[in-house]
Image: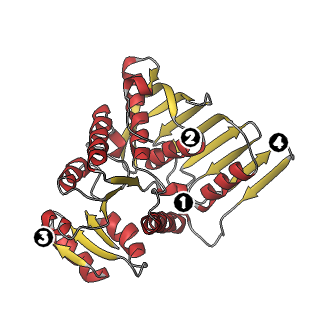
Amino acid sequence: MKIALVGTGNIARSNYVPYLTENEDVELCYYNRTASKATDLADRFGGRAFGTLEQLMSGSPDAVMVLTRETDRYAATQAVLEHRPRRLFFEKPLVAQYGQANVVEDDFGKAKELLQRAAELGAETAMVFNYRFFDQTRKARAIVSKRRFGKPVHFSGMVHYACWSHCIDLIHHFVGPIAEISALRSSCERTGTGGRAPDVTAAMRTRNDATGTLIGTYGLDFQLPLYELIFAYEGGRIHMRDLDGDMEMIEYATQRHEMHAVSRHVSRWQQYDASFGKSINAYLQSIRDGAPPPVPGIAGLRELQVEAALKRSIAQQRPVVLDHAFPIDLAE
């Protein structure tokens, strides 16, 4: 299996290539605008560096992982699409031309353009969203499914912006697509790891009529839990906290109240790093099996749809219906 990497910076070096090289059937190819960075990665991990994108794509890779900075991802993906790739795998967020702390409405439009073009070319798209692969996240999904919690009715979250796009995706993952948003922002901005932005509070309604609230902020201490999410269903609720925090389950029918924890010898950053390996391996296995990717590209567009709606609701001081204001019009 030939995997091409476009963008060979720190994310590729730390979170992708070490796990890709664990798969004996994977041949790695690299391209970076700064050619020495691609060469350095090939020298360290094996594989082949290419001086141009044309040379990289001439080998007809099975998948192209677009791992550039989010500010460069739109242009990089446009260039890759000129070579009719079979599959595209994106880092998150899908597009953020001013950085992930400053997503604007136009980012949604550009991301939609990329996915539309990929669909026209028959290229399958996928996203990372590795928080879905945390141990406690997978345990929570299994509990909700196996114990038949029923229809989601409510959710709430407080999230550090470092985890923002991931937690929006987790709401979609556990509750379903968001249909309507009404949002407010604070008058001042906070500075945190990753940028500077105001606090945001949003009231939301999903397509299946669950309601919830979400707070985004740089005001959470980075050394302490970075997010807290509660998902309530007809038959119980799930409470998740941080990258390696405890997951709490309450089941109404049986009056059960359980706590699930990862091993205490595993740090939050070990858990974070391991989630990339699980995400990458699941994606590679989907290619081997000829199956859909575990996280489709449209998940990245849905996350940006929420961010665009938040910005419009704040700017216009009114509720925004997402599919009216920012229609996706792509196959799920």
User: Picture coordinates of residue 173 (x, y %)?
Assistant: 55, 46
Q: Are marks 2 and 3 in contact (CB under 8 Å)?
A: no
Nearer the camera: disc 4 or disc 2: 4
State the residue position of label 3.
51
Please name the residue shown 59% across and 70% down the image.
Answer: 266
Q: Dot 1, crowdedness within 10 Å: few (<14), some or many (≥20)?
A: many
Disc 1 residue type?
A: Phe
The reply to whether residue 187 is visible in this rendering is no
Going by the image, does 218 lie left or right of 7?
A: right
Q: Which mark is residue 290?
A: none
Inter-mark Cα distance, 3 to 4: 60 Å
Inter-mark Cα distance, 2 to 1: 20 Å
Q: Earlier in the sequence, mark 2 or mark 1?
A: 1
Disc 3 residue type?
A: Gly
Inter-mark Cα distance, 4 to 2: 24 Å
Inter-mark Cα distance, 1 to 3: 34 Å
State the residue position of label 1.
133
Going by the image, does 233 lie left or right of 294?
A: right
Q: Which mark is residue 158?
A: 2
State the residue position of label 4.
252
Please name the residue shown 12% across and 70% down the image.
Answer: 51
